[in-house]
Amino acid sequence: MFGNAKDSYGQFIPHHTDHEDIYNFLSELRIRGIVEYNPAVLPLSRKEIADMLVRADTSSGLNNVQKKELAFWLREFGKDLGAGTVKKKKKFFSTRTYEDREIKKRLDLFYFANDLFQVTVNPIIGGVGRINTQGNLNRYQSWGAEVFGRIGKGFGFYFSARDYLEQPNWNGAPNLSPELGGVFRRSGTVDNAIEYYELRGGVTYGWKWGQVGIVKDHLELGSAQTSQIILSNRAPSIPRFHLQLKPVKWVELTYTFGWLNSELVDSTRSYNTGNGVYREVFHQKFMAANLITVRPWKYISVSVGSSIIISDNNLNVGHFIPIMFYTALDQSFNGQSNNAGQNSQLYADLSWDVFGFGQLYGSILIDEIRLSTMFDADKQRNSIAYQAGFRTRVFTPWNLKVYGSYTRIRPAVYSHYIPTTTYAHAGYGLGHFLGENSDQLIAGIQLRPIPKMRIILEYQRWRKGAQHVFGSNASNLSGVQFMEQVLASTDRVGLRVRYQLINDLVFELSADYITGNSNGVHQFQGMEKLGRTSDIWFGLGIQVGL
């Protein structure tokens, strides 16, 4: 119906994983072998998604719900196939189609396209209201706009701004929440509320086997659907350089170099301005990370990579080498002195789409390990995290899918005895939201009885132990055991009914039973009291733009 996807323009415009419905759909197609992509590196670009939808349209393996959803998503991504020009209509509010492909176009606030230039502008307006059985109210709202487009066949650009308000603080630090956190301030207009911005954008260039850009956006590493242990979207997005190369079908490289917020004042560079103001200057902090993925067979992806957190201008050109092993690089520059070194990590990921029946995946992150004593309980220094899970293909006419995962993060993972080199940005961990000395269990089912609707029933258990307290060096890490005492825990059962009426107009109903114990230091999302808590929260959300 649509021709060859290779005719597409080559621009790279990331499509954020906040658009969870399209990524849920693509995951189903990948598990069935209908499309191919690397689940360990997200987000995908709009062009990549559009090309996959074209391939799916030639497949005979879609059921009725999936066929209708495919037509729905092509309304959104048809503009990324070819020039995206539309047929002229004389009537206002009439449905338009793309000139080079018979695809109906979605509704946009503003859209223009010709052979050289394309631009889309849409609003972002959203609100969520929650109330629990105690009569406590919670609201979460955002507003803003997004713009994205291309120049020629390779250059892309995008920008979005969101102004968030939460009343009270629900997702922000110090709450332990899987949702996006922000660098917030107390609201000057709304009592007991916080406000923060989330800005994303970039200038990019894409070609047949690669993409490069200067962006401020999230990068997710790891095959888990959410809350990855390697790199997640919990922290605010960071400004960074992005490079991704796919020279052959069976190997790809992802590299990024980013600027982080240490939130630690450098007293040697801070100063008095002379008019009574003390100018605070933070310690500089950077991150370099890479991931190399090899696909020895169609259904298996094996990825390995490393990252490093750099502080105090200790940059060298080696940090800009995309295929560098950063742990070894650091040791070659610090004179074998931990006090002079940086904080590096090593990680790996495995994803196996099991012959069209489901996906098995696992990730491991090694923050520190001593191989000679790793099996000695009293001398081990196994600061590692691992994550394993599964999700099935869809079954039955209602598109039933079952999924589950377990995550364990040992003490001192993400932390460091030199505070300027922690695996964090603006007070939020770059990896899993629970942080060190914790675990998480997830089990859920999802139904899609009609197109564009998802019904999700999910159980989660979160547990949190004590944070490791470093001495003057890392030597007191030897023999530290996993979660010797559970300081806070929660069990939660949630039901979500989500429906996308038109592209980027989403309605959601939710009900969450939350029970657990909080020690006041580790505050879980939705638990407002110290000690034992048991509550039911009901929610209603509406979102225009994501």
Image (spheres, grey):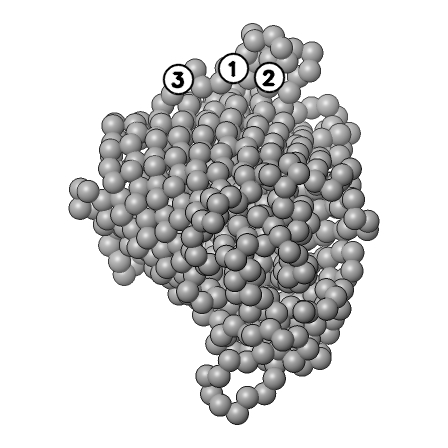
Mark 1 and mark 2 lie on one chain; the one further toward the N terminus is: 2
Gap in angstroms between the C-alphas marked 1 and 3 = 12 Å
Mark 1 and mark 3 lie on one chain; the one further toward the N terminus is: 1
> In the figure, 465 relative to 97: above or below?
above
Label placed on residue 480: 1
Q: Position of residue 259 (x, y in %)?
A: 61, 49
Q: In which quarter of the image is the N terminus?
A: bottom right
Q: Do the residues labelled 3 and 2 touch (CB within 8 Å)?
A: no
Sort mark 3 into few (<14), some (14-19) or many (20+) by Cα contacts within 10 Å. Answer: few
Q: Nearer the viewer, residue 12 or 174?
A: 12
Which residue in the protein does label 2 denote? 381
Mark 3 and mark 2 lie on one chain; the one further toward the N terminus is: 2
The answer to whether one can see residue 259 in this image is no
Q: Where is residue 134 in the image (x, y as percent from the top left)?
A: 17, 42
Image quadrant of residue 330?
A: top right
Which residue in the protein does label 3 denote? 485
**Three-letter amino acid code at the position of disc 3:** Gln
Gap in angstroms between the C-alphas marked 1 and 2 = 7 Å
